[in-house]
Image (tube, helix red, strand yellow):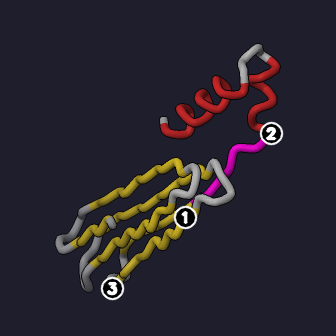
Amino acid sequence: MHKIYHEAPDTSSEISARGVLRGKSQIIYRSDIAMEKGLKGLSGAEAAKFLVLSKEAKVDAIPSLDIKSKEVSCSHSLSITHLSDEDLFYPKTRGMGETEARKLLIDGFLQ
């Protein structure tokens, strides 16, 4: 779990998380940005991206924003994606085997 508390004016935060799941793996991901009342000039962002490589893997993710102030900028995003045959098509047409193509795409996702 990630939690950011903004308790002073003119502060900013950013949460960025990525994960790759395979087999029967599971992840419970929670993140929260809290902004106290009456503060100005606050900026916060949280983003999480997960790549699921098997049908049995599971992601339980809940991003949360607790905004008590009016003059702030805050956002959150969450994406869960899978590798498809279409994703593997191009590297395989360039002579890569399936294993090498998967590794290339997973490494690219993590970067």
Which of the two labelled residues, at mark 1 and mark 3, occupies the earlier sequence position? 1
Residue linked to disc 1:
59
Marks 1 and 3, Cα distance to the nearest angstrom? 29 Å
Above or below: residue 15 compared with residue 32: above
Residue linked to disc 2:
85
Residue 58 shown left or right of residue 83 in the figure: left
The boundaries of the magenta stretch are: 79-86
Give amino acid for label 3.
Answer: Lys
- The disc placed on residue 68 is 3
Tell whether label 3 touches label 1 (CB within 8 Å): no
Question: What residue is shown at x 17% (from left), y 71% (from top)?
Answer: 8
Marks 2 and 1, Cα distance to the nearest angstrom? 21 Å
Question: What residue is shown at x 43% (from left), y 75% (from top)?
Answer: 64
Above or below: residue 22 compared with residue 107: below
Give amino acid for label 1.
Answer: Val
Question: What residue is shown at x 43% (from left), y 61% (from top)?
Answer: 46
Above or below: residue 22 compared with residue 108: below
Tell whether label 1 touches label 2 (CB within 8 Å): no
Residue 109 shown left or right of residue 83 in the figure: left
